[in-house]
Image: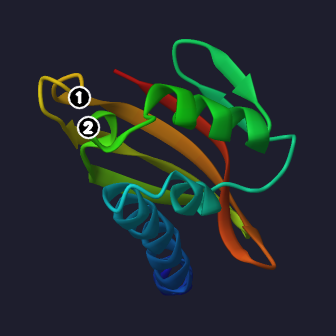
Amino acid sequence: MRWIVGLAMAMQLSAAPEEASVRKVLDAQSAAWNRGDIAGFMTGYEHSEDITFIGKTLTRGYDGVLARYRRDYGDRAKMGKLQFVDVEVKMLAEGVALVWGRYVLERTAEGGGPATGRFTLIAKKAAAGWKFIHDHTSN
């Protein structure tokens, strides 16, 4: 029985650095967003036609997701200031993580007013590091 507890603790310790690496992607995304850098924000996504974004509609592919962000958040007022809060990361398998939390977008009335909602992401570890391959965001 003690070996089971030891194995579980070892698995948790080995997952901790990976979870921290996934969280760093979110930190980099919010920093890029808060600089007004949508292209920088998008570096958190895998540059692939296979990625998906689900919000009010389904968007497929990196270029489609980038176009959606540029259309919906085309100026600094609409972008506002972004924070990711209540974030949890669960390792599903080696190189695959499930991420969920809440986004908080502080904006002026001119920019569309404050917004908040929940998100669920699937992240995949690639040669370039952790990348999001699926994003389901609701408000």
* Residue 4 seen in the current view: no
Residue at the location (60% across, 29% down)?
Answer: 68
- Residue 34 bears which disc, if any? none
- Residue 21 pos. (x, y %): 51, 77
Q: Tell me if residue 46 comes above or below residue 110 in the rendering.
A: below
Q: Earlier in the sequence, mark 2 or mark 1?
A: 2
Q: In which quarter of the image is residue 78?
A: top left
Which residue is denoted by mark 1 in the rendering?
111
The answer to whether residue 19 of the structure is visible from this angle is yes
The residue positioned 25% from the left and 43% from the top of the image is 80
Q: What crowding class fits label 2: few (fewer than 14 Cα within 10 Å), some (14-19), or many (20 or more)?
A: some
Residue at left offset 26%, top offset 37% = 77
Q: Kindly identify the amino acid type of the residue bearing the numbered disc 2.
A: Ala
Contact between marks 2 and 1 (CB within 8 A): the answer is yes
Residue placed under numbered mark 2 in the picture: 77
Secondary structure state at the residue bearing disc 2: helix
Q: Please, what is the three-letter code of the amino acid marked with disc 1?
A: Gly
Query: Residue placed at 12% from the left, 32% from the top?
Result: 108
Residue 55 image position (x, y, % from top left): 53, 21
61 and 20: which is toward the camera: 61
